[in-house]
Amino acid sequence: MIFAHSFSRTEQTLFHSLQKSCDLYQLDCSQISGPDELKEQLRYTEAKTLLYSFQKLDAYSHLDSFRIECERVSWLVDYVIENDFDQLVILSWPGAYFNSSNLFLQHKGMIEQKFVQSGIRCTLLNVQAIGDRLFRQNNFHELFFDKQQNAYIIPQRSNFFVYSITVENLSALIQSAFRKGKNGKYDAFDTIMDLRSFLGQYSSIQKIQRLAPIYLYYKSFLGSYVSPTMLELFLLTVVPMYKFRTEKELGVTLDDETIHNQIINAEPIRAYPLQSHEWLWNHS
């Protein structure tokens, strides 16, 4: 399996979790400078399955960041078509839609379209919040952590909640998705909690401060907070997610801590040696 991702801390933890039962070839999306470079990096593999993720959420700080990712996804899609891939699993976002009024959701919807239109069997997983209990980390850390105050700064909206999933459950769900080979879009979560509780549970940061959204918008436009399009994700009406279809069709129980027992006796996923790189994103 090729695991193409942005080398965020959460994705690295997911990689190590998947590696326990899968052979992976790791591809750093930020290192792809063109289709020829992509082919060069993958020339020693014969893998026919692709897992795609981009959880380095703070990278979405300007318009070029969206354009660059779309361009790299286009190269990936051309590659998997040319090499007759069997299956794709894509980590997307709830509410992703190519015609969304939010730039991030619009961008994610366009990426979904690119993969689906490849004609290859494609499973889309709606993933919002990812947490790891062992290392006490989460995929929202870079969005909300303020180094100067050593605190999370979040919008002052008490009723906002997130759909979260642990790295362990996400790893097991991904493996089940590859085994089932379904075409479709599925919600991926095991717990619903408010944003403050999620950050407190999956980090070692003790201080979480809530500020008025209008002030955070001001900080955002000054460049001292997350980009406006990312801030909007936590102010918009929450898109409801449902896991009963995911559990039924992909054969998992997402609120069960023994989810890994469901795949212990399954046939291992085979692929090729991993390749690891230092993660680098060029904001210029």
Image (cartoon, rainbow, N blue to C red):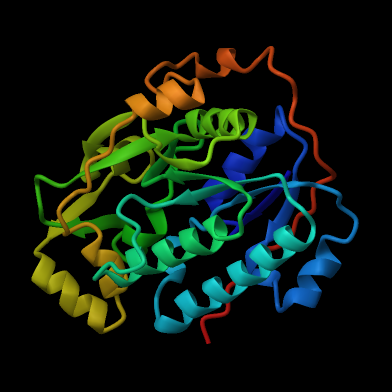
Q: Is residue 183 left or right of residue 232?
A: right
Q: Residue at x 80, y 34 (%)?
A: 270
Q: Quadrant of the N terminus?
A: top right
Q: Position of residue 152 (x, y in %)?
A: 28, 55
Q: Residue at x 76, y 46 (%)?
A: 48
Q: Residue at x 80, y 47 (%)?
A: 47
In the rendered view, would you say 176 is above or below 64? above
In the rendered view, would you say 25 is above or below 154? above
Which of the 4 quarters of the picture holds residue 28? bottom right
- Total marks drawn? 0
Q: Position of residue 276 (x, y in %)?
A: 76, 55
Q: Is residue 158 left or right of residue 276?
A: left
In the rendered view, would you say 269 is above or below 33? above
**Do we see residue 242 in this rendering?**
yes
Residue extending furthest toward the bottom: 284
Residue extending furthest toward the front: 119
Front in this rendered view, residue 9 or 177 = 177
Q: Position of residue 114 (x, y in %)?
A: 53, 64
Which of the 4 quarters of the picture holds residue 58? bottom left
Q: Is residue 234 left or right of residue 173?
A: left
Which of the 4 quarters of the picture holds residue 234? bottom left
**Do we see residue 225 in this rendering?**
no
Q: Residue at x 41, y 45 (%)?
A: 127
